Image (tube, grey):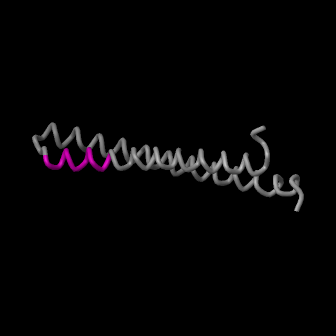
Amino acid sequence: MTLLAMQDQIMPALGRVRSILYEVQVQTEQTAIEHERMAAWHTKRGEQAAARMERRAAAVQQQRLADLDAAFGALQKAISTALGLDS
């Protein structure tokens, strides 16, 4: 398979992955925000244990976002390197 043929296959696939990643990122961000809101609500009501649990859940979502960003960055770099696009 030629380099051009590989690019013709890989680039659309990467575009689809990027689109899916964006959707996952948006959903994860919304979930993190909701956990932060719930933490504030529990704090306001004096429910410190529940607030801590919600803050931990928000932190997990934030870590997932960071992991997704890192994984996708590595994937893009690997593909670019393999196709010689980073020269």
For the C terminus, give its image quadrant: top right
In the image, taking residue 71 as reference, residue 57 lies left or right, namely left
In this rendering, the count of numbered labels is 0
Q: Position of residue 25 (x, y in %)?
A: 50, 47
Q: Residue at x 60, y 48 (%)?
A: 74
Q: Is residue 56 magenta?
A: yes
For the N terminus, give its image quadrant: bottom right
Q: Position of residue 38 (x, y in %)?
A: 26, 44
Residues shaded magenta? 49-58
User: Magenta span: helix, strand or loop, mainly?
Assistant: helix
Q: Position of residue 30 (x, y in %)?
A: 42, 45
Q: Nearer the viewer, residue 45 or 81?
A: 81
In the image, taking residue 46 as reference, residue 63 lies left or right, namely right
Q: Nearer the viewer, residue 23 or 58?
A: 58
In the image, taking residue 15 as reference, residue 34 lies left or right, namely left
Q: Residue at x 87, y 57 (%)?
A: 5
Q: Quadrant of residue 85?
A: top right
Q: Residue at x 57, y 46 (%)?
A: 22
Q: Residue at x 64, y 54 (%)?
A: 17
- Position of 3 relative to 32 (above/below): below
Q: Is residue 22 magenta?
A: no
Q: Position of residue 66 (x, y in %)?
A: 46, 44
User: Which residue extends farthest left?
Assistant: 46
